[in-house]
Image: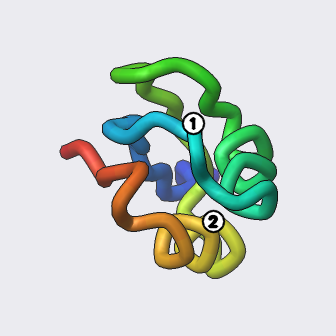
């Protein structure tokens, strides 16, 4: 069985003074603290969430 592709996401920005929707996107990705790295499946939904908050997260190799 083939492995599902994953993407590592690192939080680089603080959610303080950000709109509530951006905070909810971070929580949905599993991020809540600065410099935390999570690994998620590489799906269009995850890529869309990353695209909505590029100033708060980055994709790590």
Q: Residues within 10 Å of mark 2 (few under 14, many from 20)?
A: some
Residue marked by disc 1 = 16
Q: What sort of colour scheme is used for the picture?
A: rainbow
State left or right for residue 27 relative to residue 42. Answer: right
Q: How many marks?
A: 2
State left or right for residue 55 relative to residue 51. Answer: left
Residue found at x 32% / y 38%: 12
Q: Front-most of 61 and 13? A: 13
Is 17 drawn above or below residue 43 in the view shown? above
In the image, which disc is placed on residue 38?
none
Q: Front-most of 55 and 49? A: 55
Q: Position of residue 3 (x, y in %)?
A: 54, 49
Residue found at x 46% / y 35%: 14
Would you identify the image quadrant in which residue 32 lies? Answer: top right
Cα distance, mark 1 to mark 2? 22 Å
Who comes first in sequence, dot 1 or dot 2? Answer: 1
Would you identify the image quadrant in which residue 15 lies? Answer: top right
Secondary structure beneath dot 1 equals loop
Q: Position of residue 35 (x, y in %)?
A: 35, 22
Q: Front-most of 60 and 12? A: 12
Residue found at x 58% / y 45%: 17
Mark 1 vs mark 2, foreground winner is 1
State left or right for residue 51 relative to residue 44. Answer: left
Name the quadrant of the C terminus: top left
Residue marked by disc 2 = 46
Secondary structure beneath dot 2 equals helix
State left or right for residue 8 relative to residue 3. Answer: left
Q: Front-most of 27 and 61? A: 27
Would you identify the image quadrant in which residue 19 lies? Answer: bottom right
Toward the left, the furthest residue is: 61
Residue found at x 41% / y 51%: 56
Q: Residues within 10 Å of mark 1 (few under 14, many from 20)?
A: few
């Amino acid at each position: 069985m083939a492995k599902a592709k994953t993407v590592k996401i690192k939080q680089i920005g603080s959610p303080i003074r950000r709109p509530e929707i951006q905070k909810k996107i971070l929580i949905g990705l599993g991020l809540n603290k600065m410099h935390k790295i999570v690994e998620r499946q590489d799906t269009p939904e995850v890529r869309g969430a990353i695209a909505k908050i590029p100033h708060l997260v980055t994709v790590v190799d």
